[in-house]
Image (cartoon, grey):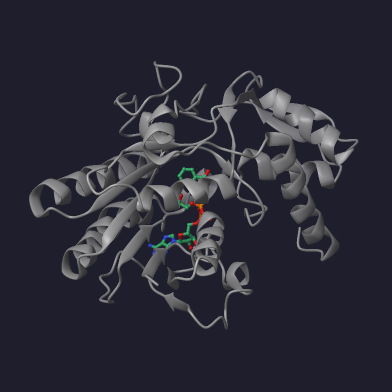
Amino acid sequence: MKKILVTGGAGFIGTHLCEKLLNQGNEVICLDNYYTGSKVNVEELIGRKYFELIRHDITFPILIEVDQIYNLACPASPVHYQVDPVQTTKTSVHGSINMLELAKRTGARILQSSTSEVYGDPEIHPQKENYWGRVNPIGIRSCYDEGKRCAETLFFDYYRQYNIDIKVARIFNTYGPKMQLQDGRVISNFIVQALKNENLTIFGDGAQSRSFCYVDDIVDGLIKLMNSRNDFTGPVNIGNPDEISILELAEKILKLTGSKSKIVYKPLPLDDPKRRQPVIDLAEKELGWQPQIQLDDGLKKTINYFKSRVLYNKL
Ligand SMILES: NC(=O)c1ccc[n+]([C@@H]2O[C@H](COP(=O)([O-])OP(=O)(O)OC[C@H]3O[C@@H](n4cnc5c(N)ncnc54)[C@H](O)[C@@H]3O)[C@@H](O)[C@H]2O)c1
């Protein structure tokens, strides 16, 4: 049994990760400041013998004995990370320093949940880990993108300077149950709009593409990376290479929900990347990982979750 700290553990991906780690027989400490996560997300875990919940902001240091740290804390949706951009950068930068210092003190292995956003609006398609990215350093998305890039820098400098046992995952668009319903991410937006028979809003012409990975696959990839061979640090892309245009996605969700909604178009927000698709050869080779869940199956599970929220008037 390992003692595992999951920062951001009450968020969307963190909740699924905590549950899986517990089910694998570990002791899990879920740390969160509930900025975008909530206790409701982990309500089924509260009371389990090896689950502990701590309210804490990682921009401040914390001292606890652990064997592994998954550093997930950071708002991931533009709607949320742009509300307080200074705090977003602090969470990535100060937060990473605090978690890396904790790893240094305890000898814990530490995994950073980085993002495909480090590639920015890429000139190279699809994106491989050796691509350095094309990020606007002063735009409205920079607090997140540059914060995450600096966090990667810190992870590699702690590795080189202090020999910290690091792993860096570059996560691509993820979806599934427990996504926040109103956080502006495209899948949650479309499903909520479809279920309410409201217009589905496409920003731009809908030709921009994304590659969506179901949350269970992401969690599986993160755990495989954490337990990968000692000298493998990453960065490694964790995402689904199946690319789909936003228009196709909207049409698929309309079909799966049986909604009568119409599609409407609005201007594209600033610095919105046009294409995103991971090359996952490295994850396949090093982790023996590839996504297992098809988009249609994952969407059905997500729609069912959102429907249950509609029934309870939580939309
Ligand atoms: N969901 C995606 O598509 C995606 C894609 C790429 C990377 N990621 C990364 O994965 C991680 C988890 O993303 P998510 O989708 O679950 O987002 P989320 O917003 O649902 O979860 C983030 C969690 O971190 C917590 N948090 C934020 N700031 C904190 C702080 N200073 N101290 C303590 N807790 C804090 C929030 O309350 C929330 O529970 C993030 O680091 C994100 O950047 C997510």
Q: Residue at x 50, y 25 (%)?
A: 277
| Quadrant for the C terminus in the image | bottom right
* Whether residue 120 is visible: no
Left or right? Give the position of 167 relative to 267: left
Residue at x 67%, y 40% (from the top left corner): 187
Q: Residue 267 in the image: x percent, y percent? A: 62, 26
Please state the horizontal and vertical placement of residue 11, each as a whole percent of the image: 53, 60
Quadrant of image for the N terminus: bottom left
Q: Residue furthest left?
A: 161
> With respect to residue 276, does 9 lie above or below?
below
User: At which x and y percent is residue 134?
Assistant: 34, 24
Write down the quadrant of residue 283 in the picture: top left
> How many marks overall?
0
Q: Nearer the viewer, residue 291 or 59?
A: 291
Q: Is residue 193 above or below residue 252?
A: below
Q: Is residue 2 left or right of residue 107?
A: right
Q: Nearer the viewer, residue 194 or 138?
A: 194
Task: Let me know if residue 13 appears in the view.
Answer: yes
Against 212, is 220 above or below? below
Tell me residue 55's x, y (percent).
Answer: 43, 76
